[in-house]
Image: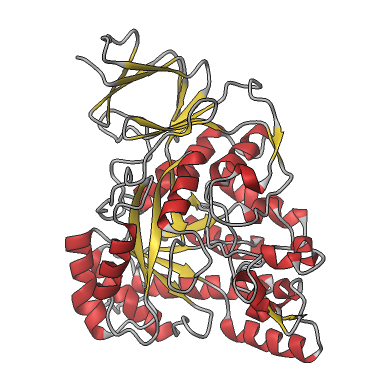
Amino acid sequence: MEFDLIVKNGIIVNASDTISGQDIGIKNGKITCLGETLPYSDSTTILDAQGGIITPGGVDSHVHLEQWNTPTGDTWETGTRSAICGGTTTVIAFVSQARHHDTVLPLVEEYSQLAWGNAYCDYGFHVILTNPTAKVLGKELPLLVREEGITSVKLYMTYEAMKLGDREVLDVMVATRRLGMTTMIHAENHDMIDLLIETLEAEGKTEPYYHAVSRPMIAEAEATYRAISLAELMDAPILLVHVSSPLATKHIRDAQTRLLPIYGETCPQYVWLLAETLKGEHFHGAKAVCSPPLRESSAETDAIWTNIANGTFTTFSSDHAATKFNVGGNGKRLGLVDGKPFFSKIPNGLPGLETRLPLLFKGVLEGRISIQDLVRVGCSNPAKLYGLSNKGAILPGKDADLCIWYPNQSMKSFTLKNDMLHHDIDYTPYEDMEFLNWPRYTVLRGQVVWDRDGRGLAGKLGDGKYIKRVGSSLPGPRNVFVNEWRPPA
């Protein structure tokens, strides 16, 4: 057999094992085999990993790109460019339904047109539901699953313009359970938060730091428990997105111990940043405003690391929801009203697509998690949960998506500056953080698209392809119910 590309002299890491002494043979964009002394010809490209770790290409399953409600955020071009320069080869972004939309099919078509031909990496879509009408649930979701390969929806329990009541959440779960879809839930108690914002503003406490005060851990924990209870009633699998606190994490862990199909996602900001970041001078704290907010102490971030390592968290996503800072009257500066800060008006979200995997690898180097944990939450589990059947593992038959790291201690350490990154955002919350490793090469379906020491960005706009997804391969409904009642068929 003749190969298009052979990757040799690397340490291959999957979610459950490490393989040394085996080369990776790639043909027509697929991993064809793992083996020793693979045959090659003049037309075969040889990529020498020089003893570096090789992980599957990253799968970032929670990304906001070019949405109508983030006019200063990354586009498909700039966001996916940033992804491959950080070792991520697949992203899943959001088609967003506004409350006044009584349909989602035209929104999917419009968003598809934005992405088509404008992506550097492969991509798929989730759908955010804010108006789950009978038509959407009964007619349109089945079409999206069957025709578009969209097998997940996202729901909000907070934000006035987006939140659903418990009955609406249950109605969605009836449909998603029947269709084999995964339901993602942003869990925070809206009424708690609304009361705290109202009283804080009345007291004149409106600086960015009070964003964290207004969204305490108990608000996340209560909504998380409630979402799990709704899912248990319906026997429906859910993923709690961007979990930030030990309290909410404990509810997820307890549900998993009872074998419920409850999954958890966390993000880099909840293991590397603290609420004190919101106290930056000259309104710079606005750069770190996200929801749920950054937490107060290292005890909380330590607990999140522990629950990555012990398997509670299924996925580790960037939740890249970036808006620019230095844009007068827009972006993060929407939180300045006549020169006075109002945290409740600051757009939520941080940039993080390119830094997600390097920050996770930093946790490996510091002994927080294992390299297999990195692959599990950063590559393989997102692929399994969201039906990316050809992604997330270095195995024959899978897409040849790879991230090749520097050999141990061979990369010169550096202090991160925003101008080193490839997004279109004017800051990174991880400015001045030291890195001892970074993706050296990114390979997308057998093509080197990132070469840090050589060509740099080597991929082309349009390399990324839309992926029609299938249902989750992780455990789903168990046909176990709380009593004799059963969800409507």
Q: Is residue 156 left or right of residue 140?
A: right
Q: Quadrant of the N terminus?
A: top left
Q: Please report the residue visible at 27 percent of the width from the left and 80 percent of the height from the top.
A: 103
Whether residue 9 can be seen here: yes
Of residue 362 and residue 247, the one placed in the foreground of this image is: 362
Of residue 284 and residue 72, the one placed in the foreground of this image is: 72
Q: What colour-coding does the image apply?
A: secondary structure
Q: Does 168 sit above or below residue 386?
A: below
Whether residue 310 can be seen here: no
Q: Please report the residue visible at 28 percent of the width from the left and 52 percent of the height from the top.
A: 466
Q: Is residue 456 left or right of residue 360?
A: left
Of residue 10 and residue 296, the one placed in the foreground of this image is: 10
- Name which quarter of the figure residue 279 lies in: bottom right
Of residue 106 and residue 156, the one placed in the foreground of this image is: 106
Q: Position of residue 121 (x, y in %)?
A: 38, 45
Q: Residue furthest bottom?
A: 202
